[in-house]
Amino acid sequence: MFTAIILIFVLSTILTLGLTPGVITIAKKFGLVDNPSVRPHPAHTHTNIIPRAGGLSIFLGIFFPMFFLFPLPKYFFGIFIGAVILILIGLWDDKRDRSPYIRFITNCLAAGLAIGFGVGIPYLTNPFGGIIHLDSLRLNFDFLGPHSILVYADLFALLWIVWTTNIVGWSGGVDGQLPGIVSIASLVIGFLSLRYATIDPNQLHVTYLSFATAGAFLGFIPWNFYPQKIMPGYGGKTLAGFMLATLSILSFSKLGAALLVLAIPMIDAIFILFKRLFLKKSPVKATTGHLHHHLLSLGWGRRRIAVFYWTISALAGIVALSTHSKQKLFAALSILILTTMFIIWINFWRGLPRKTEEDF
């Protein structure tokens, strides 16, 4: 088991690392590039022309080893098909910016496919004791065979996957920031699922997929770290959140661990959403108000910002691996309070150059 975990982690890392130069060549050939002078984007922080479509090599790094090394469970194919859709729409977006509403619908479709193949949340662990059951309402029907819909479980899973798919992608604004966070979070989920794999062999597939995801995003870091040679593109960003969302569900609903590791991106996203709704702006359109934008305004370098995000995610991951539910809740609330205070301080007390309403 441990040999297989190491093998798939190393293979995924090497595949993504080795395939990315070819993806860079393809992106340049077919115009899958980000040129700020031709296609300005309010959330991007670079000024030079950079290839996009990095999600393609990450996708291959995750799924190629899985198909050839292990027998695969039913839910894997739902995740795979959902990931294919996200990558294809992502490449389309890399060529020509698509409407954020098309992107949102695509994310919902990918989430629905994963849920249809068995990725659901039948229960949640109550940090104060006991279990919160979400499988009380079941609808049975025959469609290409017997099938059941757990209404509350599937609805909660849909919300979780769509939310995580979107907000994780928002944390890709600085070179190397996104792949580092995702690699760390995937490793944490992998180690958590490994605890159950010794008593439930079905959890081994979750462990393998978690380490494949961690390896693929790790292999992308050398090409994306400052100065970045390629961007993840929209497909890579959505794939990141989609994989973390589904893996956290499959590892016996370790949503608390995912919330802890992704605490800063989650809090940053909530802050942005409330801010945009307050200004009566669309919550799905790009913005310059994210935490990494403010850190850049404070004079932080891109390397420093990426390492800052990685460090917080790694520390939160250590806490997630070594604490029980109630302690995770306390740690998450502590990060929530501290991060919120930090964001408020940056926004209102540092005297940063004020953006016009059109910038938000």
Image (cartoon, rainbow, N blue to C red):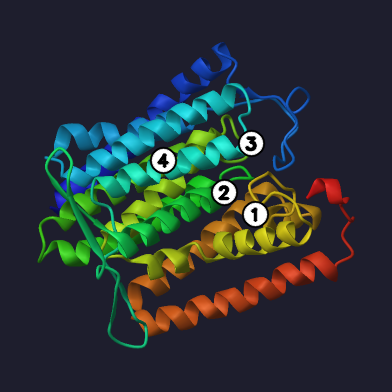
- The residue that disc 3 covers is 227
- Give the left or right position of residue 3, taking residue 228 as reference: left
**Which mark lies nearer to you, 4 or 1?**
4
Q: Earlier in the sequence, mark 4 or mark 2?
A: 4
Nearer to us in this view, 162 or 187 = 162
Q: How many marks?
A: 4
How dense is the environment of label 4, judged by Cα within 10 Å: few (below 14), some, or many (20 and up)?
some
Q: Which residue: 84% across, 69% down? A: 348
Check disc 3 and report its element: helix, strand or loop.
loop
Q: Earlier in the sequence, mark 4 or mark 1?
A: 4
Q: Residue furthest top?
A: 29
Q: Earlier in the sequence, mark 3 or mark 2?
A: 2
Nearer to us in this view, 250 or 146 = 146
Q: Is residue 24 visible?
A: yes
How dense is the environment of label 1, judged by Cα within 10 Å: few (below 14), some, or many (20 and up)?
many
Q: Measured along the vertical axis of the image, is residue 255 above or below residue 163? A: below
Question: What is the CA distance from the residue labelled 4 to the residue labelled 2?
Answer: 27 Å
Q: Quadrant of residue 256?
A: bottom left
Question: What is the CA distance from the residue labelled 3 to the residue labelled 1?
Answer: 13 Å
Tell me whether the residue at label 2 lies in contact with that at label 1, contact meaning CB atoms closer than 8 angstroms: yes
Mark 4 is on which residue type?
Leu
Residue 294, percent across and down?
A: 75, 57
Residue 109 - label? 4
Q: Earlier in the sequence, mark 4 or mark 3?
A: 4
Question: What is the CA distance from the residue labelled 4 to the residue labelled 3?
Answer: 34 Å
Q: Is residue 223 visible?
A: no
